[in-house]
Image: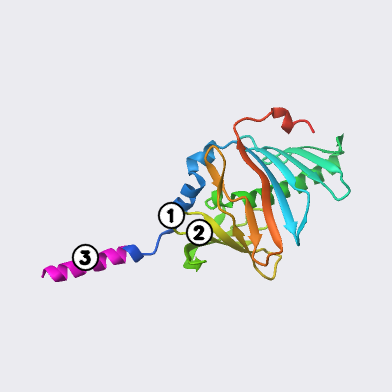
Amino acid sequence: MKKLFFYALCVAVLSSCTKPQKKDQVFEKIWKATGGKSTFEKSRFFEFEFAVERDRNKTPGRKHLWDRYTGDYRLESVDASGAKTVTLFNVNTKQGKAFVNGVALDNEQTSQAIQTAYAKFINDSYWLMVPLKLQDEGVNTELAPDTAINDVKCNVIHLNFDKVGLTPGDQYWLFVNDNTGEVVQWTFLLQHQQKPATFTWAPYQDLGGGLKLSTKKINTDGKTTIYYPVANVLTEVDKTKFTQP
């Protein structure tokens, strides 16, 4: 009788260990890996530079400064000719002004510059902050079967969008280390692409205040790297950065 009880207890324990995880449990691990949802909520000012290396050729990075509480934004970029564009706008109202080499653009040019800057904000911040945005309104998520990457068990989250964002037809698969909660890889199929792409993620690092994210993603084909030579959470910012070029 004791043997039967012991056997039943072992079966129960093993069953509980192999029980599939729920999506909320995976989200909880992801938040813990980033430092926690409360840490993100307290992170107001983000400074980062989005840079690309393709076939060993580096392109000039785009410099971002964001007041997440007010929506005020500063984007600096340099084109192939060396001309510097500074766009100062609000990501919520999409109103602002723009300058090229310190000279203010006219209304039509400013409108176009803000539209371009907003698209860069969406793209460049997403590459950095996607673990913080999985539960945003309009994001649809579901768990796919677990898989192993380099012998590490990973939970897989498939996400798409409910008519939000600039490219709602995009799809992503995030591979989350089952033990640490860090995203170690993602695969995406963009709405204008025929084939998916896969990037491995560098380990997380502290950007400031305890908020942790990956700042380097490398395409598995070895040709393209997305990286952030600058990525900080700041406690204060000179407010003229949002008003003067």
Specify whether residue 164 is painted magenta: no
Question: The magenta stretch spans which residues?
Answer: 1-16
What residue is rendered at 54% in x and 42% in y?
Answer: 211
Q: Which percent across, then down, holds residue 107?
A: 85, 39
Residue 50 at x, y percent in the picture: 70, 48
Residue 3 on the magenta segment: yes
Secondary structure beneath disc 3?
helix
Crowd tier of the residue under label 2, counting other residues whose Cα lies within 10 Å: few below 14, some 14–19, many 20 or above: many
**Could you tell me the amino acid type at mark 3?**
Leu
Q: Where is mark 1, residue-wise?
A: 24
Identify the coloring. Answer: rainbow
Q: Which residue is mark 3?
A: 9
Cα distance between the residues tagged 1 and 2: 13 Å
Residue 2 sits above or below residue 244 on the image: below
Element under label 1?
A: helix
- Can residue 202 be seen from the camera position used here? yes
Dot placed on the residue nearer the N-terminal end, 1 or 2: 1
- Compared to 140, does 40 lie above or below? above
Label 2 vs label 3: CA separation? 31 Å
Question: Disc 1 marks which amino acid?
Answer: Asp
Q: Are marks 3 and 1 in contact (CB under 8 Å)?
A: no
